[in-house]
């Protein structure tokens, strides 16, 4: 995915001259170029533009950071921090992409996606099954 490519359509936007506090829930992609403090929840993509200043607990599918983010970033698919991006806090995601020049300070936990098929249960061998 290229920097300017958006997953789905953008159904929300916080402009560069806007400051907002609260909770945001959205179904399509959402872009923040202004200042936001609070919680962000979605099953889709969050884009933090170059002027974006976000202090939040974030739980989305994908997040692309070109601005500043402080908080907990939980992404079920991936987190991308571009060269102008600055992230301070905790990242929880199965896939992390950090471009040259980007800044990240904090902790990162790489969680694997839940497998669609259930693991096979190993059968216990009885004394009859064991060969000596």
Image (cartoon, grey):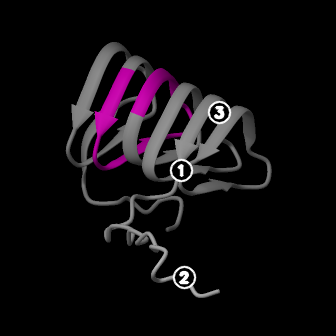
Residue 106's x, y, as percent? 71, 30
Q: Magenta stretch? A: 39-58
Residue 50's x, y, as percent? 57, 38
Q: Locate residue 8: give its quadrant.
A: bottom left
Residue 118's x, y, as percent? 33, 67
Residue at the spot x=49%, y=75% of the render? 127
Residue 57's disc number: none
Q: Is residue 72 visible?
A: yes
Residue 121's place in the image compared with 57, above or below, is below
Q: Is residue 16 visible?
A: no
Is residue 42 highlighted in magenta? yes
**Does 16 sit left or right of 92 as displayed?**
left
Q: Locate residue 9: give its quadrant.
A: bottom left
Proximity of marks 3 and 2: CB atoms separated by less than 8 Å: no
Residue 87's disc number: 3
Which label's residue is closer to the chain start, 3 or 1? 3
Is residue 55 highlighted in magenta? yes
Q: Main secondary structure of the magenta part?
A: strand
Report the quarter where the C terminus lies.
bottom right
**Residue matched to label 1:** 111
Q: Secondary structure at mark 1?
A: loop
Residue 129's x, y, as percent? 47, 83
Residue at the spot x=50%, y=40% of the render? 49
**Does 86 sit left or right of 63 as displayed?**
right
Q: Secondary structure at mark 2?
A: loop
Which label's residue is closer to the chain start, 2 or 1? 1
Which label's residue is closer to the chain start, 3 or 2? 3
**Does 75 sit left or right of 25 as displayed?**
right
Q: CA distance from mark 3 to mark 2?
A: 55 Å
**Residue matched to label 2:** 130
Crowding at dot 2, Cα within 10 Å, few <14 / some 14-19 / many 20+, comes out as few
Residue at the spot x=71%, y=49% of the render? 83
């Amino acid at each position: 995915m290229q920097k300017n490519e958006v997953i789905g359509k953008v159904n929300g936007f916080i402009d560069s001259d806007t400051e907002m506090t609260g909770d945001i829930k959205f179904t399509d992609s959402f872009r923040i170029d202004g200042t936001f403090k609070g919680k962000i929840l979605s099953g889709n993509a969050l884009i933090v533009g170059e002027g974006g200043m976000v202090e939040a607990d974030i739980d989305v599918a994908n997040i692309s950071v070109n601005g500043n983010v402080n908080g907990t970033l939980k992404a079920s698919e991936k987190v991308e921090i571009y060269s102008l991006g600055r992230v301070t806090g905790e990242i929880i995601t199965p896939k992390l992409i950090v471009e040259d020049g980007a800044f990240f300070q904090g902790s990162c936990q790489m969680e694997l996606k839940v497998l669609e098929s259930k693991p096979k249960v190993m059968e216990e061998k009885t004394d009859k099954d064991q060969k000596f």
